[in-house]
Structure formats: structure tokens, C-alpha cells
Amino acid sequence: MDETAPAQQELIQLARQMVNPPEEKTLQKAIQLAKEYGTVQHIPLSRALELGKIMLRQGMDDSSILAAIISPALENQLPENIPQTPMGERIQKELGPEVMTILQAHLTLQQAIQKSSLTYSSTDLMTKILLASTKDLRGLILFLGQVLETYKSNRIHESANPENIAKQTLNIFAPLAHKIGAYALKSELEDEAFRVLNKPGYERIQAQISQQTQEKEKEIQAVVQKITKGMETAKIPVKVSWRTKNIYAIYEKMKRKNLNASQILDVNGLRIITKNAKECYRALTIIHSLFPPVPGEFDDYIARPKPNLYQSLHTTVLDPNGNPLEIQIRTEEMHQIAEHGAAGHWKYKGKTQSIETKIQWFKQLLAWREEMELKNFGSNANLLGQDKIFALTPKGLIIELPSRSTPVDFAYAVHSGLGNECRGARINGKEEELGTPLKTGDVVEIITRKGQKPMRDWLSFIKTERARSRIIQYLDLLKEEIPRRTGLHIKNETVESDHPATILVREDDSKIRLAGCCNPIPGDEIVGILSSTRRYIIHLKGCPGTYHTPRIEAQWNQDKSNNQLLTIAVLCTDKNLLAQLLAEFQNQRAEVIKASVKANETNIRLIIRAKIENKDHFEQIKNQLLKNPHVLRVNRINN
């Protein structure tokens, strides 16, 4: 007898309860494929069935549920190779190409996490997860479901360190579920991880809350009846239910307010489901006529939805005993999205999200990363240092680079051959110069040309040692060819050819560009190098970007004032100093273009971008700023 038969039947019964259930015949095909290929990989079918049930409970669409059943049998497979395998061909033929898309997104995400260093900060790892999820967000929901499955099947205790996984769940995976709006999934992940980390505490709170709920059940039912009767009188059709907060949320509140479980009065909450948004507001009016509302405890997320599409009315009232009672009012569709986030959205739309919606999600998630960095600056100073960026290839491969890396660094990180033949780049679909600094989330397409060779001027802006070593390695092989190719003959670092021996730097000269790596301003000692586009790039004397490169003498044009953009860092001890410092810039005739504040536990760093006339002008501003007792240091920094 098949030991998994009851679990298979439970899965099918659960599917039948869905609003738009998947076809049983297709479910059976997925189960059969999981069984066949799972046996080869020594992966029990029970895992596939448990994950399928989790995704059904999350309200996922048909393709996601089928992908969940198949996914355990594809562990450790390369996502790009799967479609060409016999199993991949069967999946596409029998279950559909969309299932394959979700599986590839899921495996790409798994791969990104497995390759992550143990020294990664939570925020960096989270960023990799978010970026790996851009192709299809359902891959992320499936991954989070898989994390939950490790707890449900007790597989977590087979790992070398269950506590580390549980901490990762609380610090990364549950917050991710929360951010994409999958609150039911988030609550389950939190409770399961809490039980691993503090089983006695979990069981103690569970027992206290169970007892408290039993004692209050009659009171809660009386409130439900009163609301139901009030809605019937007003002829507003509703469904009223009540819920208990998850155990970890209660534990967090106990810690925050220094209370025990019996002192938490709002462990239960009511949910009212209406037909449409108009009925939500009518229901709110009835609630406030039946129970006194608590002042300041009302939020309208219907008129102002959260970025993750969450909509609901939140109010807190006093029950007949004078205790606070939280009530949420929403439509059925709002409820599905509230419980399951992106999953609920797919259930109602019935198809994959549009590109625009995915971009909206992606921008929101990246904004969250920045928010997380600011919140965590005290515990991890490296986050504010912005020392890493994560850019994407057009196929969704994540490339990790140092901050302010360029398309050339990106190209060499992908493959040395790609770097050597790089002649241009498109960043987010727009063609940009090869020296353009990249940002986290940029999609970079490298434009190549057969016969293209590395250029000396690339050394002036690249950030990675890999790119620098490959370029120098190539140039060293061609030392004899370089003068012939550029038309330059080097003698005492001065050019002797038909090019000028000295460059006169003027801001209106289209043949001259100031280097972003060292940010020279009038008054600085400078040199120039000739770029591949036949423009002169001006650097500070001694800038590393001019090493291994023929240099041309250069000097500033003194005939007129050259206002130059300069980025200035001001280290101080008072975060309220920004307005005062900006006023000082104005007093010194320096136009401020942009200003921002970054902080850690002890100091504040103000980053100010301003138009500066020359080096003397900067020194004058610096001296004035340093007169303020709260200002510790003033420095020029690279753009």
C-alpha cells in the first residue's frame, strides 16, 4: 500500500475547497512526475505533497501549486539547464511553460542563497533574494513555502544547526513574507522558528493564550452576535470571524511592554468581510455606533493602500468590559491579498503580473532595503558604507560588485572575454558611457564588437581588481603596439606628437572631461590622459587611475571662473546641523545641488554636492565649517 495515499487525498481535498480549483487530472500528473523523479534523487514524495498543501493554503494560482509539487525533485539543478532535460521537456509539455518559468525563478533564488558567503549581512543577503526574485515573484513565495516545509516535516532538525536556520527565518525570511504581504505565511514562519529557538517559551505562551481565549470565548461570541445583528438591521451583508494573534507576535509585545501573556488584552481580533469598498465604510459606521472607538486608533488602507497592495480599514474599539478590541474591515478580494499578498493578487487576476506591476514590486523592495540599512546602522556600520552593489544581467543573473563599479567591471565579472570585447553598455535599456557608476538593481547589457580590445583609459574608472588585472595583463602583452595604436610617444610622462604638450582645461571644451574617480577642481595639480573616444580625461596628479597610462601635462584656464561640482563629506555630532551648514554654503557663494544625511551610533555624516569655484574656494568653505564646534572633519570625496 502506498504510504503517501492519505497525504495525496488530503492535497486533492484541499484543492477542491478553492474558489477556482486546479484540475485534479493535472494535479495527479504533477504528483506522478514528482514521484518518478524524486525517487531517482532519493527525495520522498511526502515533501512534494506537504509543499503543495502549503501553497494551496497560501491561495496560489494553479501554475505555482504545480511548480511546488515538482520543485523538491529538482533540487541542486541549474535553472538554465532544466528546460532541455527530459524532465524539463515533460514538465513543459504536461504542465505548461509557466510552471517551468516559476521553477527556474525558484531555483535561481536557491542558487543565489547557496552561493552567499556566511559573512553576508542580513541586508545584503536579503538584497540578493529580492534581486533573484525579479523574474517571477512567485519563485520567492515558493521558496518561502519551502522554508516553512522544512519545519512542518521536521527536516529542520536534520540540519547541522537548526538554531541558525531559525534565526535566519526570523531575521530574513519572515520579514520578506511580511514585505510582500503574505501575512499568513509570515506568521507561520515566525511561530515555527520561535518554537525551535525557545520551545518552553512557545509552549507557555500557547497554553496561556489558549486558556485566555477559552475564558473569553463567550464574550467574543456575544460581540460577534451584536455586530451581526447591527449589520442585518442596516442591511449590510457581512461575514464576521475572529482570530488569535500568532504566538511570536504576542511574545514580541510581551518583551516590548514588559508584560506576561495574561496581561496582553488584545490577543484576539475581529475581521469583517463585506461585498465591496462602499460597504466597508458603512460597516465601520455601524461598528462605531455599537462600541466606543479608541481615539487615534483608526487607519484607512482602502483609500491609501500599502505599497504591497494591502487594503483594509483598521479600527480599535472598547468591548463591553472596556478592553481594546481590534477590528479589520475589508472585501473578500482585499482579504485574500491581505492574507497572501502577491499570491492573493494572482488568484484574483488569474495570470502572471504585468511587467509594470513587477517593476512596482521591485522598486518597493529595493526601497525597503535602503530603509533596513538606515534602521540597522547601529549594529552594522558596513551597511551605510554601501560597499557592495548587486546588478543584473538581462537574463536575471546577479553580479556582485564593489560600490560605484562600472559596466567594464560588470563585463569582466561575467567573463574575461566579455570584458575584453566590451565597446559599450546599456543600463536599464539606455546606452551609457563605460565609466558610468552602477547602482543596485541596474540591469546591464554589455555591447561587444569582434576585434575590440581593452583601452588604457578604462584603468581610470574601474573599481575591481579582476578588471584591472585583466586589462593590465592585456596591455603588457601589447606594449610595443600601444604607441602605434594611440599615436602617442611617451617621454618623461609628456606627450611629444601632434597632440598638445599641455592641455588648457576649460569647462566649455567638449574634448575635455573631468575624471569622476578623483574629482579635480580648479587649483588642483592635474594631468590628462587620452581616452578611447579621443577625449582628454583630467585627473588629479598621482591619481591611481593614471597608472600604466601615458600622461599629458595639463593646467587650468585662469581667464574665467570655473564652477565645478564637488561632493563634500562633513562629519559632525549633531543631526540637526544640516540647515545651518547649508546656510554657510550659501554665505560662501556655493550653490548646493543635493544634500543627504547618514548616521551611526556616535556621528552624523552629511553628504553635500555643491558648485565650487576652485581649490581656494573649497578651503575657505572648509575653514568656515570647521569653526562650528559640532563639526569634526570636512573632506572632498569622489562622486
Image (cartoon, rainbow, N blue to C red):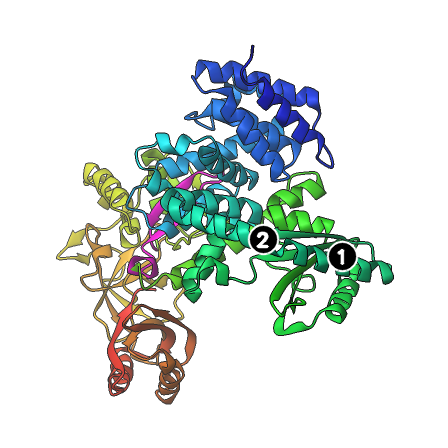
Q: Is residue 397 magenta?
A: yes
The residue depicted at 68 percent of the width and 67 percent of the height is: 320
Mark 2 or 1 closer to N-term? 2
Residue nearest the viewer, comparing 53 with 88: 53
Residue 497 in view (yes/no): yes
Q: Secondary structure at mark 1?
A: helix
**Corner quadrant of residue 307:** bottom right
Q: Secondary structure at mark 2?
A: helix
Q: Is residue 436 rendered to the left or right of residue 475?
A: right
Depicted 436 relative to depicted 116: above or below: below
Residue 429 x %, y %: 53, 48
**Corner quadrant of residue 285:** bottom right
Q: For the residue carrying disc 2, how many other residues have a C-alpha within 10 Å: few (<14), some (14-19), or many (20+)? A: some
Numbered label attached to residue 213? 2
Residue 638 x %, y %: 30, 64
Picture quarter with the N terminus: top right
The residue depicted at 80 percent of the width and 60 percent of the height is: 279
Depicted 472 relative to depicted 211: above or below: above
Residue nearest the viewer, comparing 575 with 135: 575
- Residues rendered magenta in the picture: 381-403
Residue 167 in view (yes/no): no
Picture quarter with the C terminus: bottom left
Q: Is residue 441 rendered to the left or right of residue 239?
A: left
Residue marked by disc 1: 225
Numbered label attached to residue 523? none
Q: Is residue 553 magenta?
A: no
Distance from the alpha carbon under mark 2 to that under mark 1: 17 Å
Residue 301 x %, y %: 65, 62
Residue type of the residue flagged with mark 2: Thr
